[in-house]
Amino acid sequence: MKVLVTGGVRSGKSTHAERLVPEAGPVAYVAPGPPVRSEDADWAARVAAHRSRRPASWTTHETRDVAGVLASVRGPVLVDCLGTWVTALVDEAGLWEAPADEVHRVVTAAVDGVVGAVTAAPGPVVLVTNEVGLGVVPAHRAGRLFRDLLGTVNQRVGGACDEVHLVVAGRVLRLPDPL
């Protein structure tokens, strides 16, 4: 089973996603976001909270190579989260100020690999992402670029999954198949 879990910040999507993988046995947990930096106490606290919830039987992969982990693991995989993955990809490539078409090329190539790996993965895969674009238009270019990139990533990955779950206020809505 391949499942994309989406929702807003602090909606309960990570907790829901963690419940979708088997409680017993090994799980590959992919943390593809930016590394923890000592000057960002909020990010460090968020990462620490996620780490503390993981069972000892889970193996954590802190890497941007989501496709590589999916291709190498035979059992269940939980990726949390695609929003931080997109941020890390653009950060590492130094593309926040680059022309939008260049940024889209880089992210599209990476998501092509993830979509292929999700489709080919022999075991269950649960991916967490942020739902963006439901509110105001971001005032800054980077915010608009991120919103557009992640919206496209979510569509592509959601299309490769068997189910898409939307989490709002701790409640889960299983979205119907596309028409």
Image: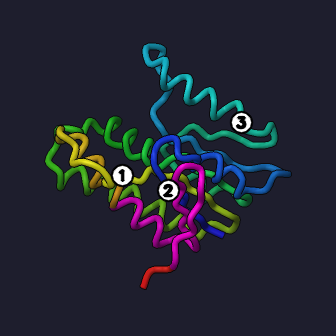
Question: What's the distance in space between the residues labelled 1 and 2, CA to CA?
Answer: 9 Å
Amino acid carrying label 3: it is Arg
Question: What's the distance in space between the residues labelled 3 and 1, CA to CA?
Answer: 25 Å
Q: Residue 166: horizontal and vertical position, in percent?
A: 52, 60
Q: Nearer the viewer, residue 80 or 135?
A: 135
Q: Residue 37: horizontal and vertical position, in percent?
A: 47, 20
Does 100 lie within the magenta span? no
> Which quadrant of the view contains residue 117?
bottom right
Amino acid carrying label 2: it is Thr
Vertical placement of 119 versus 88: above or below?
A: below
- Which range of residues does the magenta coloring cover? 152-176
Residue picked out by circle 2: 6
Residue picked out by circle 1: 132
**Upstream in sequence: badge 3 or badge 1:** 3
Q: Is residue 178 left or right of residue 93?
A: right
Q: Residue at x 35, y 36 (%)?
A: 92
**Upstream in sequence: badge 1 or badge 2:** 2
